[in-house]
Amino acid sequence: QQPVQSPQAVILREGEDAVINCSSSKALYSVHWYRQKHGEAPVFLMILLKGGEQKGHDKISASFNEKKQQSSLYLTASQLSYSGTYFCGTEGDNFNKFYFGSGTKLNVKP
Amino acid sequence: NAGVTQTPKFQVLKTGQSMTLQCAQDMNHEYMSWYRQDPGMGLRLIHYSVGAGITDQGEVPNGYNVSRSTTEDFPLRLLSAAPSQTSVYFCASSYSGQGSGANVLTFGAGSRLTVL
């Protein structure tokens, strides 16, 4: 029941934009996005609870298409501090089980 | 307010040895969980608990045991360590496990385990 993320890795220059996608084979009730810096714990970025909802956090925003069972994370005018691995997470059929995608490694270069 | 505290940070074991990874949270969270992280595989759920005395299996429970005697603590036991259990282990908690998708997970700093 793991969601599927794409791409696996992205290399950007500062100021460029990126999109990370997350899709599921089952109906989604919520999607979380987390970021993990190298050697650190994952840190919560945002949660989307309603279909079609978009949320923003600084220049990072996300959309959630409940019908397509997909979510996308948008990183605009990327900064060096955006580097890290991004994970989406979704509930399983059992709402107490929470699954993460395999991650997208983002490398922002000067 | 320490959040989620994991110990030890690093551990090296020999095959067949047993050990316990400790996890404690001081946020009065009902929901606690253990994940393992391996390269290219993301975070995989091992076990979780929705409250004291209640535990259940995740995706990859084999070789691990858990118990939840208090709200604060959720230790993970490796019964007989194998090289395949070499990984980074994260404990995470949230306010409630009911409809867990609505509840943000707070992670501990992780425990890096090597099994020789």
Image (tube, grey):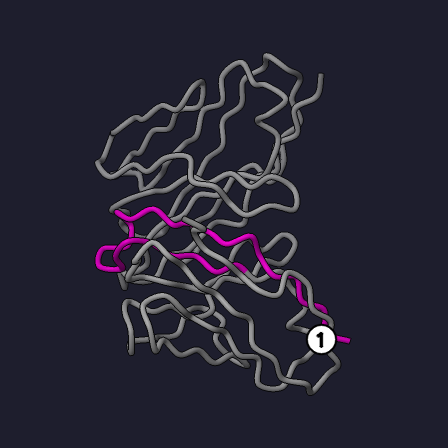
Closest to the observer: B82 or B32? B32
What residue range appears in magenta?
B90-116
Residue furthest toward the right?
B116
Q: Residue B102 vs residue B42: left or right?
A: left
What amino acid is at disc 1? Pro
Q: Residue at x 44, y 55 (%)?
A: A2
**Quarter holding residue B52:** bottom left
Residue A54: say if magenta.
no
Q: Residue A69 vs residue A8: left or right?
A: left
Q: Residue at x 44, y 23 (%)?
A: A60
Q: Secondary structure at mark 1?
A: helix
Q: Residue B87 placed where, x, y %?
A: 64, 64
Q: Residue A96 placed where, x, y %?
A: 29, 62
Q: Residue B111 vs residue A2: left or right?
A: right
Q: Quadrant of the C terminus of chain B?
A: bottom right
**Quarter holding residue A56:** top left
Residue B109: say if magenta.
yes
Crowding at dot 1, Cα within 10 Å, few <14 / some 14-19 / many 20+, comes out as some
Q: Residue B35 placed where, x, y %?
A: 50, 62
Residue located beneath label 1 in the image:
B83
